[in-house]
Amino acid sequence: MPDTTVKPKPATRTKVKLKPQRPPLYKVILLNDDFTPREFVVIVLKAVFNMGEEIAHRVMLTAHQKGACVIAVYTRDVAETKAKEATEMGKAKGYPLFFTTEKEE
Ligand code: TYC
């Protein structure tokens, strides 16, 4: 008689390595222009990016001298919302102040 008993399979395990997934981060970049008053740039940096006076002033000067300055890093949604909000503050006053975002490598 053939052996028809069902034999249990030997236990096999597949190791699934779970890599913790971090969301990609986006830089918010402040661009220089020739028209927005320096003090107004400082006001926007303080209001939208929660900077203190000293840091905001230093960041504004860096953009003024170098043409642009990375000011913060956030998840995509937060970066885009803050860049838009800050750009809108300038627009409301008729200034060409501009904040953009860029994915971090
Ligand atoms: N360059 C502007 C001026 O001389 C000031 C300024 C600084 C504007 C930084 C934008 O991102 C900026 N009035």
Image (cartoon, helix red, strand yellow):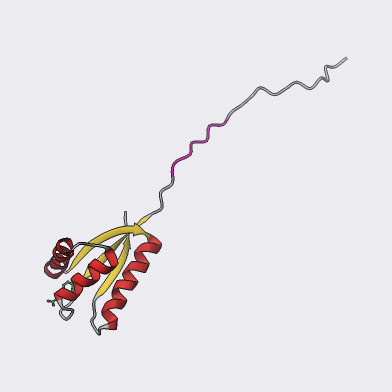
Is 49 colored magenta in this rendering? no
Residue located at (20% from left, 64% from top): 69
How far from the left and from the top, in percent, is residue 78?
Answer: 37, 63
Q: Residue furthest right?
A: 1
In which quadrant is the N terminus drawn? top right
Which residue is more in the foreground, 23 or 41? 41
Q: Quadrant of ligand 1?
A: bottom left
Residue drawn at x 32%, y 69% is: 83
In the displayed structure, does residue 55 sit left or right of residue 25?
left
Residue furthest bottom in the image = 94
Q: Position of residue 30 (x, y in %)?
A: 23, 68
The residue nearer to you, when weighing 28 against 47, is 47
Question: Where 10 falls versus 37 (above or below)?
Answer: above
Q: Give the quadrant of residue 58.
A: bottom left
State the predominant SS element of the stretch in magenta.
loop
Q: Is residue 16 magenta?
A: yes
- Image coordinates for residue 63, horizontal then vertical, percent: 16, 67
Q: Which residues are magenta?
A: 14-20
User: 4 above or below 68?
Assistant: above
Is 71 left or right of 22, judged from the image as shown? left
**Residue 72 occupies which quadrant of the picture?**
bottom left
Provide residue 92's location: percent of width, then percent of height: 29, 82
Quadrant for residue 74, please give it. Answer: bottom left
Residue at left 85%, top 17%? 2
Residue 89 as seen in the image, left or right of residue 60: right
Q: Looking at the figure, which quarter contains the C terminus?
A: bottom left
Question: In the rendered picture of this protein, how many numbered marks are placed on residues?
Answer: 0
